[in-house]
Image (tube, grey):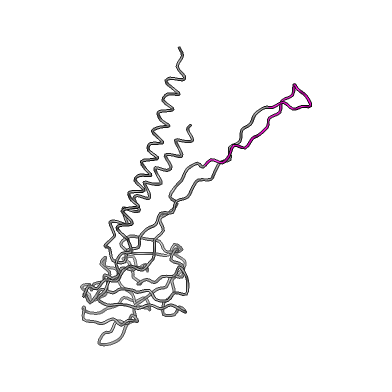
């Protein structure tokens, strides 16, 4: 009986966490470069149930030995192990703003490979993003909407001294004095990336580093100036999944209520002395 409580409760907690991930996706459906989270559900280890009973053996009628009979396996619950970002390419939308850039994936040598703009946060740490909604700060540096520097391929901030510049398809920022290549990083396995918020990603292993996409064999990409990559969240699909998750939560809630009513009868009615 008590095992049923834990099983139903674990189902409710798992659906609650999944609903939170879906709600976050929905709220970022129009955030440039946002990558939707997918909840990974796993079951707790199964239990093998056996019945132990005493039976007589033909050799001696008075002797009883315990015999085990397999009843079957029992699942003990479910949990949401993690939320994994989906790095599928989002739709490309024209904005007409010179500082907006869309990073378009081309050929990838690895099945799970993906590309990022390279940025530097306030602590001087290298971070990665797909959000090309850039701007120019008061000192003339190209920055993200949160003020993080956009880096070139040598890991240095890019100074444009205004918004009058062009970006070629291969990612060269054309200025009067020089052409500066944007720092485009290639991740052979996108699952190694961890979300940090504000559209930023970092490597799960801080000791590793992403490679320059221009030096990676078989990697092709293009940059489209005055365009943005939209979020890859599908609002219709996400809303449907949210409704299904809510119904699953309600079903587990009803099961928990049924167990509670059964326990109430067992304690207050069956166990009553008359």
Q: Position of residue 94 (x, y in %)?
A: 24, 73
**Residue nearer the viewer, 90 or 239:** 239
Q: Is residue 121 left or right of residue 70?
A: left
**Residue nearer the viewer, 88 or 202:** 88
Rendered image quadrant of residue 195: bottom left
Q: Looking at the image, which residue is at 28% across and 81% down?
A: 167
Q: Position of residue 105 (x, y in %)?
A: 38, 74
Q: Is residue 80 left or right of residue 32?
A: right
Rendered image quadrant of residue 190: bottom left
Per the image, is 57 magenta? Answer: yes
For residue 18, above or below residue 267: below
Q: Looking at the image, which residue is at 22% across and 77% down?
A: 98
Q: Is residue 64 left or right of residue 34?
A: right
Stretch of the chain drawn in magenta: 55-74
For residue 71, above or below residue 203: above
Rendered image quadrant of residue 252: top left
Q: Quadrant of the C terminus?
A: top left
Q: Looking at the image, which residue is at 38% across and 33% down?
A: 257
Q: Position of residue 226 (x, y in %)?
A: 24, 76
Overall secondary structure of the magenta stretch?
strand
**Residue nearer the viewer, 15 or 120:** 15
């Amino acid at each position: 009986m008590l095992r049923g409580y834990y099983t139903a409760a674990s189902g409710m907690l798992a659906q609650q966490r999944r609903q939170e991930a879906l709600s976050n996706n929905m709220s970022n459906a129009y955030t440039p470069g946002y990558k939707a989270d997918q909840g990974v559900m796993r079951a707790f280890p199964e239990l093998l149930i056996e019945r132990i009973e005493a039976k007589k053996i033909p050799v001696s009628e008075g002797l009883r030995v315990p015999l085990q009979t397999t009843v079957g396996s029992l699942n003990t619950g479910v949990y949401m192990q993690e939320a994994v970002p989906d790095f599928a390419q989002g739709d490309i939308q024209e904005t007409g703003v010179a500082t907006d850039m869309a990073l378009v994936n081309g050929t990838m040598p690895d099945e799970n490979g993906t590309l990022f703009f390279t940025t530097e946060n306030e602590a001087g740490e290298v971070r990665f993003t797909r959000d090309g909604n850039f701007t120019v700060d008061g000192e003339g540096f190209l920055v993200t909407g949160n003020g993080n520097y956009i880096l070139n391929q040598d890991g240095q901030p890019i100074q444009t001294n205004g918004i009058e510049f062009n970006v070629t398809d291969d990612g060269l920022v054309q200025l009067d004095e020089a052409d500066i290549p944007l720092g485009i990083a290639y991740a052979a396995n996108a699952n190694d990336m961890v979300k940090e918020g504000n559209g930023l990603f970092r490597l799960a292993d801080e000791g590793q580093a992403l490679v320059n996409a221009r030096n990676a064999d078989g990697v092709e990409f293009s940059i489209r100036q005055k365009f943005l990559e939209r979020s890859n969240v599908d609002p219709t699909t996400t809303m449907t999944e949210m409704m299904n998750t809510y119904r699953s939560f309600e079903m587990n809630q009803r099961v928990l209520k049924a167990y509670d009513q059964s326990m109430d009868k067992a304690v207050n009615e069956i166990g009553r002395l008359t």
